[in-house]
Image: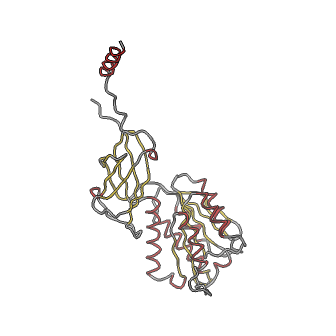
């Protein structure tokens, strides 16, 4: 009897309709591609890339350079007393050189962003000041940058970076970053290690432009200058990037090109270099699937990816 029951159960299973695949979805991935030294790779083609999901190759259905991912960018500019010297003379009034540099760097970055991006402009000395709340109006940001021509008091860099990151929580978009323009010296007496722990909690990339007017004299030539150490903790430790601008060289073509290149790399890092799509019937979140993108033509490339969207794909009507 048991064998007969087993046969009947097997027959019932065979008569059942085969399982229908789930609705297909469009999975969009945003990629950053570098070589083993960390240099960004440009001008890749769709044919150079292969997508694998849970070990199965997926057909790439769309590919383009860049990404339309909107960005919320905070600008934090040091206006403390140490940003005063040396002075440049513009017209009849001397202008603090470091403040002038910060103004120009800020405007260069804003010009390279996309229309849908939003900006928050802040300055600091002992306290944080919001000069312009989040806006997509670049002119408002540029007008406020133009008004930065006076220095303030002591430099409380560490605590005001943390305060600025708190302000970034009001951003509209998920992709967020803070650009800090500073001479990188804190006079508050607080410890750099305290800053390191606090910025790690925020999970926001920090990019830094270090404005340097003089080089540090170090008793130990092998020691890392405090200027560079602070920039590294702020930027590299949060996944950001850092640029040093020497004030005597600010007006040179090379420095201007470096600022523009830094701005372009920053936006590539935030927005992504390439966007590709593929179809999937997997319904779990991307983190629950093993998704890999590799190059079929340049095996040594390093490819970092993130999900940009996960949208239903309508099946064609029969």
Residue 290 higher or lower than 239, as above or below: above
| Quadrant housing residue 196 | bottom right
The location of residue 154, given as percent across then percent down, is: 71, 74
Q: Quadrant of residue 49?
A: bottom left
**Closer to the camera, 29 or 8?**
8
Quadrant location of the N terminus in the rendered image? top left
Q: How many marks?
A: 0
- Residue 225, image x and y in percent? 59, 80
Q: Nearer the viewer, residue 196 or 124?
A: 196
Q: Residue at x 58, y 83 (%)?
A: 213
Residue, x 34% and y 49% (percent of image)? Answer: 52
Above or below, 311 relative to 19: below
Q: Position of residue 107 (x, y in %)?
A: 51, 69
The quarter of the picture where the C terminus appears is top left
Identify the residue at image location x=57%, y=54%.
171
Please state which of residues 101 and 191 is positioned toward the viewer in this rendering. 191
């Amino acid at each position: 009897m048991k064998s007969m029951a087993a046969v009947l159960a097997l027959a019932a299973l065979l008569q059942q309709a085969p399982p229908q695949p789930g609705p297909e979805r469009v999975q969009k991935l945003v990629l950053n591609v570098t070589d083993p030294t960390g240099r960004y790779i440009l001008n890749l083609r769709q044919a150079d890339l292969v997508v694998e999901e849970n070990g199965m190759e997926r057909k790439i259905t769309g590919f383009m350079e860049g990404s339309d991912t909107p960005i919320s960018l905070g600008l934090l500019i040091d206006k403390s007393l140490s940003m005063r010297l040396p002075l440049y003379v513009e017209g009849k009034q001397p202008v603090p050189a470091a403040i002038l540099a910060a103004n120009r760097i800020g405007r260069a970055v804003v010009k390279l962003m996309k229309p849908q991006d939003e900006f928050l402009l802040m300055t600091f000395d002992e306290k944080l000041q919001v000069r312009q709340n989040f806006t997509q109006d670049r002119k408002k940001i540029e007008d406020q940058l133009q008004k930065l021509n006076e220095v303030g008091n002591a430099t409380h860099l560490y605590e005001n970076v943390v305060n600025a990151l708190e302000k970034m929580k009001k951003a509209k978009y998920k992709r967020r970053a803070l650009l800090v323009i500073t001479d990188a010296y804190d006079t508050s007496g607080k410890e750099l290690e305290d800053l390191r722990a606090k910025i790690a909690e925020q999970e926001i990339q920090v990019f830094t432009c270090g404005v340097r007017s003089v080089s540090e004299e170090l008793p130990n030539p092998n020691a890392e200058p405090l200027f560079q150490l602070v920039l590294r903790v702020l930027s590299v430790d949060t996944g950001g990037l850092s640029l040093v601008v020497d004030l005597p060289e600010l007006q040179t073509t090379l420095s201007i090109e470096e600022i523009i290149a830094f701005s372009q790399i920053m936006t590539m890092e935030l927005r992504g270099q390439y966007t590709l799509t593929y179809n999937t019937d997997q319904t779990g979140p991307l983190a629950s699937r093993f998704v890999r993108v590799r190059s079929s033509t340049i095996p040594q490339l390093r490819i970092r990816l993130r999900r940009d969207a996960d949208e239903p794909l309508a099946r064609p009507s029969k």
